[in-house]
Image: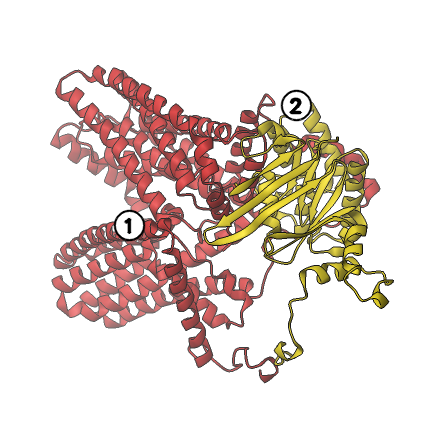
Chain colours: A red, B yellow
Amino acid sequence: MAGLNGVGPDPGAGALSASARAQYAAMAALRWHMFVNGLRSKRGAFELGARTVSFVLYAFMGLALGTMMGAGAFALASDEKWQFLPAVFWVVCILWQVGPVMLASFQEQFDLGILLRFPVRFRSYYLLYVVFGLADVSTIIGALCCLGIWVGVTMARPELFAWTALALAAFAAFNILLVRAVFAWIDRWLSQRKTREIVGALFMIFLLSLQLLNPALHQKRRPQPRTPQERIENLRRMETEFAPWIKTAYAVQQGLPPGLAARALRQAGNRQPVGALASLGVLGLWALAAGSVLARRLKAEYRGENLGSAPRRETSRAKTSSVRASLVRREGGWRLGGSSPIAALMEKEARSLMRTLPLLWVIGAPLLMVLVMASIYRSNASGHPFLYALPFYVAFALMGFTQMFSNNLGAEGAGIQLLFLSPTPIRTVFLAKNLFHFLLFWLDALLVGILTTLRLGWPQGVTVAATAAWVLFALPCCLAVGNIFSLRMPFRIHPGRMTRQRGSQANALSSMLLLLVVMAVGAVVFGLCRLLASPWMAVPVFLALAGAAVFAWLRGLGNIDRLANQRRDSLLATLMKTE
Amino acid sequence: MEIAAIQTHGLTRRFGALTAVEDVTMSVAQGQFFGFLGPNGAGKSTTIKMLTGLLEPTAGTIEILGQPFGAGALELKRQIGVVPEGMALLGRLTAPEYLHFVGRMYGLDRETTNQRTEELLEFMQLANESRKLVTDFSHGMQRKLAMAAAVIHGPKVLFLDEPFEGVDAIAAGMLKTMLQGMLNRGATIFLTTHVLEIVERLCSHVAIISKGRLVANGSLADLHAGVVSTLPDAAREQRLTLEEIFLSIVGAGGLEPAQELSWLA
């Protein structure tokens, strides 16, 4: 490579060659410089503080989950109930795979695509891609869960020390590679029009199926067992009904990574080293397969594939000109009435949202969780109605909206310039966004209400009224503070990606704190009114609070133009930043 | 006396200790095609951002069409169109949706917006791409769309920051035709570009900014005369290109051959 002053990679060098190591050092130095330079501004220092707090919180979360997993593994290994061990591994696997989607927007992720302009070998690129993701929240939590399982099994059966370590290492490798592979492919599908539309359609079908699933489950609903005898009978009936399904599912899962990891431990525990080795081998093959799927995707990126849609073949001008006008008319699809900027902005928000899968996901995911939580509660309920199910689940759904409320300019990208260039005041822009989010949340809350009713039965009228009143208080609070966060702590959302987003820990932490305060106010009012045996009191109390919140929101809105103009330079710089 | 389309007095912008633009005073008459030139980092984009309300000046005043201009001058913003450095596009919309949105943000009624959207897409040869999201457009197509969005409300003053960057020759020709048409109907165009041939061909007046200060301002003939007057008598007869005028005013960078990167192939 002397012809190019020796800057190219050595042809025979591997991922750990001297030139590759020099590149890793350069990458590490780059990350360090980015970190140090980020501290130059007050915001950067604040971000560091927020990240430290978040890291401690995630570590506690991981330790708590790890302890739970460890306790579960200890109990199962001590009693030799190996057949239930897969459940522990499945929980860890789901946490590992779903975590990044729930937390993607709250983490700062480094886009390694910038490396492709340099003479980096594919193996180095692959290694960096995997290694750079090791510090993300789901890996930390997953690793702590694995540690918990390892400690639990080893305490119960010290002779399984090495087997457990091996099984968990293979299981962790599989999860790390699978989560990277899945999101690398999702990012790929989201980057092309056709695949993006297909993924979007599938996502909408998934959400709709969720709604249809409930009536189906509802049909099977029987009266809740009230006496211990009824409960035992209920369990026996369920056992008979579901036994064939459970057997099939158990058999299938034994061939899947969580089942294989558990099976390896069971076989090792039963002194069947050959069987355990075979299970570990198959688990290793799964990890290899996940790694290959990831490699295939990264290889295409490495070769410099064009992520944009291929240009359409030119058709003759004469042929197309006759259809152009009608095409233009047709393309608008639906339109919101009125020519006002508010209508235009709400229409734009709706269109953009429908095409931004990451945002759709953060709104839709809580619905899924509500369904799961309501179902779990229902199956564990001992005949006691969950009085506050509706407000609890509505509050949970509100969590999905925090990112939109607190970073409502994040998805604008370069379009933020237009908002400042146009004669529409920024106040109007925020008003339209707030109205859109307000309506969207009510729609989401309605869906939550339907899901809760279908799974847990009709809520009391007073609970519905009090929940609606709480929403009337909570939404203006979140919107008012969210508007300020959007201007003070904005971050750019890449609408075509599920991962590799540049989030803001400070924004995420502050908005979650606000949500907790709003929820705490709700809990205190609900609790006090129940203590005083006057549940209806919650309605006027929340309405009074809502009045104050709306006043604060309007006051805040009145100051938006001034604040936006003060923060204009930094907003434009942050939201148009390309890395 | 005719009101100037753009008038600045002592326009200054500082970023901490750095003065990006210092004491720029200039006037652009209505109906002028005005070229604003300068080397990289000279303050061109900073100036255009201040002129369009994207950046607050540290000192100085701006008047557009005789009225003081700032971020809050909303009525005045209806009179200007801008193709900014980042193009201000919304990637998740299609081209017709984007133009509809822009039209309504500028206060056009629905019927006018529909009609102009159709005409602009046809003119820019983007009608075939009306299903594609803007994010999937090529760079050149995005430039054309940004230009369409800048003119949909029929502005009297148009600011263009590097509008021809990444645009092919056919599209560039089309854009020039459109700009010429606007000029003939009395619009004022303020253009920054690094392509000096375009300025030479289109602009009647030119200003040059270097290290944040305005170092030349006038018609092409004035600039030519100014540079020629500094030359020895024997060289005064020659016809200078705008590139030569530009280099003569801002300097070529002063690199001696020995300082060049001798290790480059």
Q: Position of residue A568 (x, y in %)?
A: 49, 41
Q: CA distance from mark 2 to mark 1?
A: 48 Å
Same chain letter for marks 2 and 1: no
User: Which element carries disc 2, helix, strand or loop?
Assistant: loop
Q: Which residue is mark 2?
A: B109
Q: Amino acid at mark 1?
A: Ser
Please say if the residues under marks 2 and 1 sit with CB atoms less than 8 Å apart: no
Residue A545 versus residue A38 in the image, above or below: above
Q: Which residue is the site of mark 1?
A: A54
Chain on which label 2 sits: B
Left-right relation of A388 to A575: left
Q: Secondary structure at mark 1?
A: helix
At horizontal 24% and vertical 41% (from top left) the residue drawn is A239
Q: Position of residue B215 (x, y in %)?
A: 66, 54
Question: Is the residue marked by circle 1 packed among few (<14), some (14-19), or many (20+) residues within 10 Å?
Answer: some
Pick whichever, A77 or A486, lies toward us: A486
Quadrant housing the C terminus of chain B: bottom right
Q: Chain of mark 1?
A: A
Q: Is residue B18 above or below residue A555?
A: below
Question: What's the residue at 26%, 36% (across, down)?
Answer: A516
Image quarter of residue A422: top right
Residue A417, label in figure: none
Residue A569 against residue A123 in the figure, above or below: above
Q: Is residue A262 visible?
A: yes
Please determine whether, in this image, residue A93 is positioned above or below residue A31.
above
Q: Quadrant of residue A181?
A: bottom left
Which residue is at the far right?
B237
Instruction: Say few, some or many: other residues with alpha carbon within 10 Å of mark 2 (under 14 / 14 to 19 / 20 or more).
Output: some
Task: Say left or right for A560 vs A88.
Answer: right
